[in-house]
Structures are given as structure tokens and as C-alpha cells.
Image (tube, coloured by chain):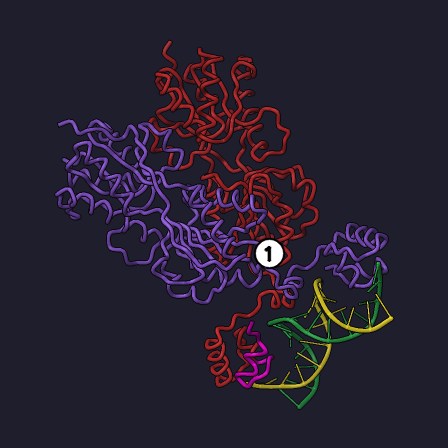
Chain colours: A purple, B red, C green, D yellow
Amino acid sequence: MITIKDIAQISGYSISTVSRVINNRTDVSDAAKEKIREVIREQNYQPNENARMLKQSISTDISVIVRGNRSIFLESILEEIQIRTGKHGESINVHFIGETDDEVATAIQIGQYLKPKGFIFLGGSADHFREEFSQISLPSVLVTVDASDLGFENLSSFTTDDEAAASCAVARLLSQGHRRIGILGGHRNDRGGRSGSGYSTLRIRGAVRELEKNGIHFDFERDYESCAFSAEGGYQAAEKLRRKSPDLTGVFAINDAIAIGAIRLFRDRDLEVPGDISVTGFNGVDYVRYFNPRLATIRQDVAMLATKSVDDLLLRISYGSPAVHEKIPFEYIDGESVASPRK
Amino acid sequence: MITIKDIAQISGYSISTVSRVINNRTDVSDAAKEKIREVIREQNYQPNENARMLKQSISTDISVIVRGNRSIFLESILEEIQIRTGKHGESINVHFIGETDDEVATAIQIGQYLKPKGFIFLGGSADHFREEFSQISLPSVLVTVDASDLGFENLSSFTTDDEAAASCAVARLLSQGHRRIGILGGHRNDRGGRSGSGYSTLRIRGAVRELEKNGIHFDFERDYESCAFSAEGGYQAAEKLRRKSPDLTGVFAINDAIAIGAIRLFRDRDLEVPGDISVTGFNGVDYVRYFNPRLATIRQDVAMLATKSVDDLLLRISYGSPAVHEKIPFEYIDGESVASPRK
DNA sequence: CTGAAAGCGCTTACAG
DNA sequence: CTGAAAGCGCTTACAG
């Protein structure tokens, strides 16, 4: 491996001067600059980043840690984060980890060698934060999961109000005259620590609350079916739900993929959507607008979620402003998958 | 910041011994181990990774670089790669970069501080490899893009035969009796260096070749429309295509998202799919099986693409085997979006 | 504008 | 089993 020492030797200058050239210092003669650059190019020299970091301890950019890498929803937030940080002239490095991995432990590790200015956590749950986040002192923001009750002064959070949004979706079904409404997806008992458990509980809670507010008791045994967060999961769960409760006229699915799977199942069983049964999803990622029928769903404001998170983080990095916890407005989007019940 | 020196002082042992404990060496007395571990815990000490790497130069795990992070297709390959490397007891770190970023430059950088055993490149194009890959000496594999004509001895590639697969999809349309077939998506003139340009050319070429083999001249002006690789892109392009060529009975879309968008457009214009017009996609990601109509498409063998890539890389890391370039079999999947033309 | 030297936090022969 | 010392590749006062 070729080092700064080699470059110094070959170019005839000292290590110090080579270092200055590498770091684009101005206090170097043009002759030196030119010669040294030439040698660097020739030798294809790359400074050892570890050695630089070791000395500098300079925070370079922002680390984004995404937990659970299968979701289009998270992907689109990430894209917006990239755009927004770019606008501020900041750059980010992104680290994807599995649904069962520990985002806080990952951040601690990353903190060692990348020395970021701050962290953005995308997805996951609050579990690991509660236990380990105290070890992180950099300004951070949790996007998508509420951290207000964790009480860390260097951790902001920006979320959609899952509970209110679920209520809203169910309210739409109710206003169309549906009284027999089922819920699909998530885990009712929210232990297990699996990712997604956080928001699925909130969505289920919001849906049930809205039903009960309207005098409808929700019977989990009969009208609820849990499932994986995928189209296949929705497909299978919808079949079970249909068997248990053939008289349902409306279904609230915890997310869009589940809704899509459910709709397909209903059609495969010769039920018309929305004629025989209405379905709402949750998330409003763009492509559901192309489904047939167009899916009625909740759109989370991806752009605002990303923008506010980035802006807040940068402000806190520069000015040490206190952490905030904010709910971003959502929107119900009409679709062809919801209509009034026939009878 | 608390360093190994502090731990040594507090524990009363030397830096060397502390280092041994940190690295789980066996040649340390139990008393020392215990005491030092205790101090480390108390002080919440984290070894500086940069300093460790600087000395060790030990390659830890495998770096995966994904270019263009919006595609479900790439996501699923990544997932398989994670599974496969996990089975071999290897761990990976994943780096997502934008469609316009330079994956090879990124790899060079990563090589500095993470010191991986090897690289897996996912997506992107061959452009940056041609120019800069000679600077990388680690065993690497390019997944999804053919590198056989680049001639690097440390770069394998595993790809779907895009050209043959496109021919196959078009052959199915032809065998149903379609003669007026349009093509949607990609960039016909393949300069510009934008990602995806590589495979879209191959797919278009394969489709056209099949048509001409069957005596049908393809008129790009009339029967082709380029577009972004998204449902929205497909939607808009389908509208233009329909206007230019209302007599088309079949459409080959360069990927599934485009196909989905096109189908939606046709339905919005009161054309039945497949009654009035048949549509095929490309990729066969799972969720298209839930669309209505189920999409006929090419399924790339995601699992094999990932498995072969990982196995090849590990073999070459351990035994220095030569790089290989392999095409992974694809499969045409029937769907409800293709039928014989009416007239 | 340039160079010699100290030091970043760690690991690892080497000697005991 | 333990410690003193050299060295990893770089940066940065300091002196000239």
C-alpha cells in the first residue's frame, strides 16, 4: 500500500507539504502543488481515511439508518431526505439494517468510524432507543416513530398521527353507511419487539376507537385478523376473515400492501370491490393510484416528514436548539375501493 | 473522549492488557479480565474504530453498494444477499447511492475505512467500471449488469439475459396472434449514462429482434414511446402511444411499474385489458400477482442471482478463483393481462 | 512557503 | 500472564 510517505519521497517534498496539498491548503507554492498532484495521480494514491479521521475527529456528514428495507414507503422518505440534505449542501450516508437488527447499536458503531454530525433514524421502533440511546450524544431524529415520551434531549421525532389517521379512514367507511367493518394486519398483542409493532397498535387502536365512538363494539375474535405486512399476508388473512365474518361490508387494512392482497382475494372469491365489500389501505404510496380499483387510503406526507426532519436536525447541529416532537398532517385519499354497502 | 489509556489507568493494568481484553484474547488472567471489563462498562468506553483499523488492516465483512434505491426488484435481491451471506456466517454492510452517483468511486472510498473483504455491486451500469474499476483490487461482483466484456479479472457478473427474456415476452404476444405490438419505456438512444440505460437497450433490442424474426418491421416513430421507470411514466407514455397507434393490440413494457401504469391508462380510456389490448411487463416482482388483471411478466430469478453472486464472491475471496460471467435463467409468467386480439 | 517532530488511539511483537 | 515500546498513516502546531 502506498502512503503519504511514498508520495513525499517520490515528489521530493516533505510529508507535511504533501499533506497540505491533499487538504487543499493555500499556503503551498504552485510548483509544489503541481508536482505533488502529479505524483499522486501517477501513483494512484488514496489517503488512508482511518488515519485522517483518527487525527481530525472532524464530523463530516449525516448518517441515516434505515431499519427494515422492504418498504416503498420508507424508500420514498429516504429519497426526500437525500433531496433535502442536498439542498442544504450536506451529504448523507445511508445504512440499511434488517427488521430485527438494532439501529441504536448500529449508530454507536457508525459513530466510531464515520464520525457523523448527526443521525437520522428511519423506521424501526422505540424499543432500542429506550434502552441504549443514552449512549449517543449526537443530535438525532427519529422519523416515523414517536419519541416524545422517551425524553432524550438530543432526539427529535416526526411522525404521522397513526391513531388519528386510522380513525379517519374508518370514519369514511362509517359515513358511507358501513356498520360491519373488519380490520386486517398488524399484531394485536404488541409484545415481541418486531418492527412495525408500534404503529400497527396505534392504527388498530384508532380504528377501534372510531367504531366504538359510533356505538359499534369491535369483536377482535370475529372481525380481526393479523398478518404479515405484505400483499401475500393480506391475501391469506382476508380469506380467513371472510370465512369468519362473511357479512362484513368494509375492511380497514393496516397498510396498502395488505389492502391490495385483500382486494385480490375478494375478487378471486367473486366478491366485487367495492360492490360487495369496501377496502381502505394506509400509506398512500404513489403506485396505489394505478391499482384497479384505485385504492382509498391514507396518505402520509412523505415530503414534509423528510423536510422537517432534516431541517430540525441541521438547526440543532448548528445552534443546539432543543429537540422537538411533531405530528405531520395526513390526508385521506378517495378511491374506487370504497362505496356504500349494497343492502 | 475516554480512551484505552484511561481504562488502563483506572483499572491499574497496562494498555496492552486492556487491549487484549477488548479483543477477547485468552492469554489474560481472569482477575484482569473481570476488573477491566468492569471499568469498561462503568466508563461506557467504546474503542476508537479508526485507530483499530489503522493498525489491523483486517478485512471485516463484505460491502454491498446499491445504485438507485427506488426499485423493489433490487430490494428483493438485496434481501436474498443478506440471507445468503448470513448463512455463510458473513456479514455485510450496505451502501445506497443515487442513480446518478458513481458506485466505483464510492467503493474506493469505502475501501479506505471499512476495509471489506470484497464488494457486491447491485444495479447501476457498466460505465463507471470501465473507467475506474482498475483502481479496485478486491474481489468483486456486479449483479444485474453484464461485465463480461470489461475484462477485469477480479470482477464477476451475474445477470438475466435481458435480450432473450424480452424476445420471449414478445414471442408470447405473437403466439397469441398479435401483430401490432408496441414497446413502452427505456431510452432508445442509449447515451446519457443514466442508470438503467444498459438493460433497457437490451430489452428493446430483444423485443425488436423477435418481431423482425417474425417478419414484422418495428417502426420506432410510431410504435415506441420512452418513459421514466415508474407507473406514472408508463401511464403518460401509454397515452401517447395510444394516440399515435390506436390499432395496437399488444404492448411490451420494459418493466412492471410501466406496465401497471399503462394498464391503468387503458382502462381509464375504456379499453379493456386484455380484451382490447394485451400488456406484458418485466421483472416479476411478487406483488404483480395481486394486480387486477394479474400481470403477465418475466420473472428474473432473484434468489439465484443473489445466491450465485454471494457464493462466487466468497469462493474467490478464499481461493482466488477466477472471475466468471453467468446468465441466470428467467421465466415467463402467464397472467390475465394477455389474451388473443379480438379481431 | 517548507520541514522535523509530536501525537491521534490503538495493536502487537518482544522481553520478561 | 503482563508491560514498555514501536509503529500504523496521517495532521498540525512550531520554528524557520
Q: Quadrant of residue A171?
A: top left
Magenta residue check for B8 = yes
In the image, residue A212 lies at what x, y percent? Answer: 16, 45
* Position of A172 relative to A5 (above/below): above
Residue found at x 59% / y 50%:
B119
The stretch in magenta equals B1-17
Q: Amino acid at mark 1?
A: Thr
Chain name for mark 1: A
In the image, residue A112 lies at what x, y percent? Answer: 55, 64
| Residue corresponding to mark 1 | A60
* Position of D10 relative to A167 (above/below): below
What is the magenta segment's predominant secondary structure? helix
Q: Mark 1: few, some, or many residues within 10 Å (few <14, many ≥20)?
A: some
Name the residue nearer the viewer: A79 or B221: A79
Q: Quadrant of residue B201?
A: top right
* Element marked by disc 1: loop
* Position of B48 relative to A296 (above/below): below
